[in-house]
Amino acid sequence: MANLPADRVVPSSPFTIVGVDVFGPWNVVARKTRGGLAHSKRWALLFNCIATRAVHIEIIEDLSSSSFINALRRFISLRGPVQEFRSDRGTNFIGALDDLHANALFIEDVPVQNFLSSARIKWTFNPPHASHMAGSWERMIGIARKILDAMLLNTKAKELSHEVLCTFMCEVTAIMNSRPICSISTDSEDPIIVSPSLLLTQKNFNTDVIPVDSTSLKYIYTVQWKHVQQLSNTFWKRWKERYIQNLQIRRKWQNVKPDLKPSDVVLLRDKSLYRGQWPVGLVNRVFPSDSDGKVRTIEIRVIKDNKPVYYVRPITEVVLLIE
């Protein structure tokens, strides 16, 4: 298992390095007609801060470049400038398949590229079929779905409107940002719970409100400023002492194995194939990691329909047959 990226263990401003993913859709009431209700679909765009584990969710009306750019503008306007976005290489971000006539976000489209370039934002893709490389924000989508499903149990699906869905997403965001990101202390003199909302809102609902005295406004402003600074310092102190320590545990891939090399014969895992089909290919190229030089991503050449086809896959999706 590789070392943690520097972005996850170095304190930074919230939403500086962000993981992005799309989930949904949901049917909402678009308008009322004589024959009943006209429905349309809505998707959710989840932004997850790599360092602070904070979450921001935006609703988009369709999987188009214009809706995606509008969601990015709203996110950046509220949370500030972003240095880098990270996502998987799913069809939600790469584009539509012509054979399936699927409508999908296209990050490599010219308008999206122009927006990212003008905002000086870098977009990094993970290798295909490497969901474990995006585990930090894939887990957040699972949590958001559970919370949203619990909310929708008391709401009739046919009566779900765009406004109600947006309200639900804001409540989901508040619940997720108020979750503890490290172990809770049992000490009664240490009541502060370290959560992303502690840093985002600079408010701690477990502490008493600062008393207001109209006779000393200067004292009030000084105390308020010190209180905000104290909450921020508390977050980063506990973040270093407790949260980072929990990330050091390597639960799998603990044994060192030889790196794959070009011309190695491998067996490719492909869940879309029928039972009994085992595609065999050759390693064409390897991509060593910049941090430790280990090979975790490779390019494979497979013969498909009597033509060579090249796939980029993580090493977890192949089995070495012959060196």
Image (cartoon, grey):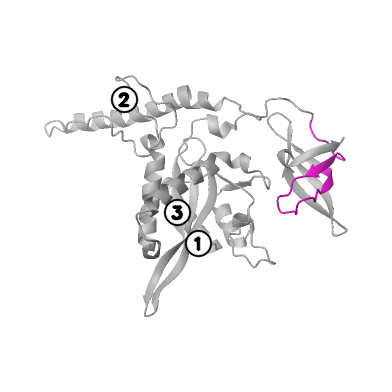
Please tell me which residue is depicted at 83% across the width and 44% down the height of the picture: 284
Q: CA distance from mark 1 to mark 2?
A: 42 Å
In contact (CB < 8 Å): disc 2 and disc 3: no
Q: Secondary structure at mark 3?
A: strand
Q: Secondary structure at mark 2?
A: loop
Tell me which amino acid carries mark 1: Ser
Give me the disc on residue 112: none
Q: CA distance from mark 1 to mark 3?
A: 10 Å
Tell me which amino acid carries mark 3: Glu
- Check if residue 263 falls in the magenta segment: yes
Q: CA distance from mark 2 to mark 3?
A: 32 Å
Residue 116, given in percent of the width and then of the height, sits at 56, 53
Tell me which amino acid carries mark 2: Pro
The front one of 297 and 288 is 297
The part of the chain drawn in magenta is 259-284
Q: Which residue is mark 3?
A: 58
Look at the picture and state if 70 lies above or below 199.
below
Q: Is residue 18 visible?
A: no
Q: Which residue is mark 2?
A: 191
Please tell me which residue is depicted at 46% across the width and 68% down the height of the picture: 40
Of the residues under marks 1 and 2, which one precedes in the sequence?
1
